Image (cartoon, grey):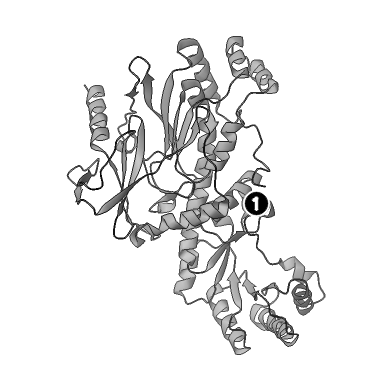
């Protein structure tokens, strides 16, 4: 079912300048010149201490289906920008290169490549836009969901954002990303079907209003769904009508011997802290101490934290608009930069660097990979180390790591006190997919394991501790040599 929408041909989902550059390469360069491109981002979204890699599965589908139809070629011909020789080349276009990526659910940090493309320059150039479109969106929502889930812990968070998402794809793949970020279920039935994730929900105010009275509406709903009887209590008057009527229904169910697997109330308006406290008092007094008290109504991580600090008794959260749109940070900011060109004569990669007066925008050159360094005694992340592909490290020896900007900040890791794991995994080799995506629920579990390797200081919502992303000696020296070369 995870492939319901995956067969779409998104080849034309690209920026115009990708094709104009490709045509330029076609007529002025070797179209088979092999290059290395890195996709990375420069700052964590939402003021977070980390981000979560998400969207790789859709990238895989995109690459597998990459080809130009006759209709595509005819459209490009009609624009008048492209020559026939180039259009003939596009007619047989397929991806033949290599792609490495962070598995979905991996915790990641600024400046490290979450996707690396090694391919002929024409192919590597074309796929930039779609890769960024897919991964930027889904990583943004997964990271936002992780913040919301962290604020609500240990309570569950339900993703309720479909009607406020920016279109069907954002609603579907945003729900998928939210599940990976830690949500327990979604209201989006198509996402549930496509990705085999739990679907959750209650009923709307219209259900209550369509009956002669609130009690009848509640009773009818309870008869239909005795095992999942969550009643929306704020249609008319939460404390005077809604909660008392809900208690009557729960009492009727008890008298009939019905043992509901999940029952309780939902609050969708008003002072949620005050109402939840009063609701808990009323439910407890009636003997329903295990009733769920869920809440919705424009929630985000900050409001959830505030409600918890006010002593609210809410223990289930439905979050919509703020999560599915990442309302306070609507863009992820991932970029895609040329890092190296293969010298066919020597078989070595010629490093490339982008310079800027803004130090954050100076790129890391070369064909690279990432190692994550953990404390051996606690499995917590010490730092990430970006290095050149092929570099190896011996955990039985000392390792010096240092800040690549403030180089006097150094840490010596003693032998046997740390472990290292290479993060980038092969996804495509010679144009063939060599990676099988886990299920969404498996990715969700892996993501939780990843977050468990973070220190609490990195997971806090405000002013989190930054995880160090360092460069190996070889990569640092390469970068400095290029900087000196271009600054002469």
Question: Within 10 Å of the Cα at label 1, are there few (<14), some (14-19), or many (20+) other Cα atoms?
Answer: many
Residue 482 pos. (x, y %): 26, 26
Question: Residue 301's x, y, as percent?
Answer: 48, 62
Residue 432 image position (x, y, % from top left):
54, 30
Extreme-front residue of the structure: 396
Quarter of the figure that contains the C terminus: top left
In this view of the protein, which residue sits in the foreground, 22 or 474?
474
Extreme left residue here?
408
Q: Is residue 25 above or below residue 440?
A: above
**Residue 461: quarter of image:** bottom left
Tally of numbered tags:
1
Which residue, as the protein is rendered here, is positioned at the far right?
A: 212
User: Viewed as shown, does residue 250 lie left or right of 322?
Assistant: right
Q: Look at the picture and state if 219 lies above or below 306.
A: below
Relative to 462, say whether 423 is above or below. above
Q: Horizontal and vertical percent for residue 403?
A: 24, 44
Q: Is residue 281 visible?
A: yes
Viewed as shown, does residue 410 lie left or right of 53?
left
Determine the secondary structure under disc 1. Answer: helix
Q: Nearer the viewer, residue 60 or 469?
A: 60
Indicate whether 433 appears above or below 44: above
Tag 1 residue: 191
Relative to 49, 164 lies left or right = right
Which residue is painted at 45% across and 39% down in the image?
101
Q: Quadrant of residue 339?
A: top left
Q: Is residue 324 visible?
A: no
């Amino acid at each position: 079912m995870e492939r319901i929408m995956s067969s779409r041909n998104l080849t034309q989902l690209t920026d115009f300048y990708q094709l104009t550059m490709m045509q330029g390469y076609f007529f002025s360069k070797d179209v088979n010149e092999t290059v290395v491109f890195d996709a990375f981002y420069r700052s964590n979204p939402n003021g977070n201490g980390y981000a979560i890699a998400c969207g790789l599965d859709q990238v895989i589908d995109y690459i597998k289906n990459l080809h130009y139809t006759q209709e595509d070629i005819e459209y490009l011909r009609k624009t008048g920008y492209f020559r026939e020789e180039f259009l003939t080349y596009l007619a047989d276009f397929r991806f033949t290169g290599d792609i490495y990526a962070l598995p979905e659910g991996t915790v990641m940090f600024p400046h490290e490549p979450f996707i690396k493309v090694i391919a002929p320059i024409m192919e590597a150039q074309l796929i930039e836009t779609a890769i960024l479109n897919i991964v930027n969106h889904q990583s943004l929502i997964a990271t936002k969901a992780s913040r919301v889930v962290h604020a609500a812990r240990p309570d569950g968070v339900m993703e309720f954002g479909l009607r406020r998402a920016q279109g069907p794809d954002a609603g579907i793949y945003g729900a998928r990303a939210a599940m990976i970020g830690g949500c327990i279920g979604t209201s989006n039935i198509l996402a549930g079907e496509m990705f085999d994730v739990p679907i959750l929900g209650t009923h709307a105010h219209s259900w209550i209003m369509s009956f002669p009275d609130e009690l009848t509406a509640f009773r009818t709903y309870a008869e239909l769904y005795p095992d999942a009887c969550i009643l929306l209590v704020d249609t008319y008057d939460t404390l005077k009508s809604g909660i008392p009527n809900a208690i009557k229904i729960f009492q009727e169910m008890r008298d009939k011997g019905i043992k509901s697997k999940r029952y309780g109330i939902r609050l969708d308006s008003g002072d949620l802290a005050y109402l939840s406290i009063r609701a808990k008092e009323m439910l407890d007094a009636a003997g329903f101490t295990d009733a769920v008290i869920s809440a919705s109504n424009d929630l985000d991580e900050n409001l959830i934290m505030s409600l918890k600090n006010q002593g609210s008794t809410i223990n289930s959260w439905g979050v919509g608009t703020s999560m599915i749109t990442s309302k306070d940070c609507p863009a992820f900011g991932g970029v895609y930069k040329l890092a190296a060109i293969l010298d066919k004569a020597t078989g070595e990669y010629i490093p490339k660097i982008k310079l800027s007066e803004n130090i954050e925008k100076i790129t890391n050159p070369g064909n690279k990979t990432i190692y994550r360094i953990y404390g051996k005694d606690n499995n917590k992340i010490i730092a990430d180390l970006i290095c050149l592909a092929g570099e190896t490290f011996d955990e039985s020896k000392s390792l010096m790591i240092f800040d690549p900007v403030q180089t006097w900040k150094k840490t010596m890791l003693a032998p046997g006190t740390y472990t290292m794991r290479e993060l980038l995994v092969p996804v495509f080799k010679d144009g063939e997919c060599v990676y099988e995506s886990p299920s969404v629920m498996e990715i969700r579990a892996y993501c939780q394991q990843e977050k468990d390797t973070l220190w609490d200081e990195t997971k806090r919502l405000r002013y989190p501790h930054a995880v160090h992303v360092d460069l190996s000696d070889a990569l640092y020296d390469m970068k400095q040599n290029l900087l000196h070369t271009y600054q002469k």
